[in-house]
Amino acid sequence: MPPFDLERVQNAVRQEKLDGWLFSGFRHRDPLSEDILSLPSGLTNSRRWFYAVPAYGDPVKIVPYIESNHLDTLPGKLVYYLNLRDYIDALRPLAGKRWGVHISEEIPIISLMDAGTAFILEKTGLTLVSAGGLIQRFKSLLSDGDIASHERAASGLYDIIDEVWNAARSAYHQKSPLYEGDLRKLMLLSMKKRGLVTDHPPIVGSGIHSADPHYDLDGKGSLIQEGDLIQFDVWAKESAPGSVYADISWIGFFGSNVPNNIQAVFKNLAAARDETFAFIQSELDAGRRPTGAAVDKHCREILINLGYEQAIKHRTGHGIDTECHGSGVNIDSVEFPDSRLLLDGSCFSLEPGIYFPEFGMRTEIDVYITAGKAVISGKEKQRAILTCEANPVF
């Protein structure tokens, strides 16, 4: 774990025009704080602690006597508390200022402070502001090295799709039984071969299972039948600490001739994906930084205008960093609208999906922003449904 970077934290506070960033922890419920502060693992955390980092000047460590060494690795003035009165007195010097804390109405993944603690802070006179922008600047804006890590992971995932679909084509022509679990196992073996790791096995959903965006097969899963649409969704990163995830989705057809209705859905879905990417770039070219909500709204309107409103079951994308569903900007205007801007270093998925009772599909690419330009990572995005009579199209 890299050492705590006080200057970087204070720069983020100043960029967000706040008075400070207030970290806290209780029973390890806030892994974001522990990660950003580079706290040692294994510390006992049975009492609440605070670490107040002002925009300028020295931080303040507020810790209980019983766990007085909890923040010893961090710089700053040390204040102990023994009881509730001490606890409140230690917080009073922070009153009258705007503090970024880990709460959010929009971004559940960073809303880690409990309501009781927030109530005490506000009652003591602190003004609480969501630290969403701070977390984005500190944790989710990729460096050149981070982007290189992400690109390597993405390239590996594209190769895995190629390899897995060749296996599916071979099974089709040999008329060998093929289960969803067979393909998932192959994907996991291919990840291991490439030195990639994941927090959850990939999705392989055939037939009606493709209509479930988060389908998770049991055992071998279902036998794949001729004429089944197959949805692949795979995410992974390199095993080295600090590596960045990639996350892609592809669609195959276990047969030779894709029905016209399925072809039409894919054509419209891919067009919405590509037009949404073009919208991001046009906004950047005009000197504007779109929000995650604005990008999702644009994609959603395209699909709604095509008559798919009832078939849209999820947001257009999510932030990506060292976690697959990271702390950065989500491409979301409906579930938890994300008003944060797509800054240089932002990395996120674009994965519009359409789901019907009989089948569903989504096509997912990853995008990052660098020097005011939007870049699609990995290899060529999917332009046509994979079939068993043609090589994968990259």
Image (tube, rainbow, N blue to C red):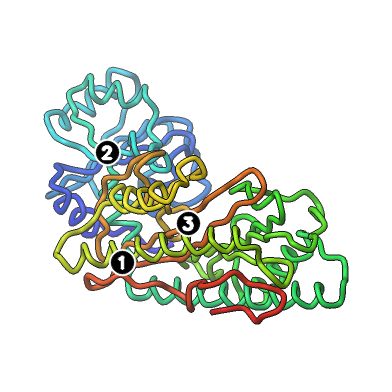
Q: Indicate the quadrant where residue 357 lies.
A: top right
> As drawn, is 239 to the left or to the right of 193?
left
Counting other residues with Cα less than 10 Å from the Cα at mark 2, is it few (<14), some (14-19), or many (20 or more)? many
Q: Position of residue 116 (x, y in %)?
A: 36, 22
Q: Position of residue 97 (x, y in %)?
A: 13, 34
Q: Position of residue 220 (x, y in %)?
A: 82, 56
Counting other residues with Cα less than 10 Å from the Cα at mark 1, is it few (<14), some (14-19), or many (20 or more)? few
The answer to whether 386 is drawn above or below residue 363 in the figure is: below
Q: Label 2, on which residue?
A: 130
Res. 73 visible in picture: no
Which mark sits nearer the N-terminus, 2 or 3?
Answer: 2
> As drawn, is 227 to the left or to the right of 68?
right
| Image quarter of the N terminus | bottom left
Q: Amino acid at mark 2?
A: Ser
Question: Label for residue 278?
Answer: 1
Q: Amino acid at mark 1?
A: Ala
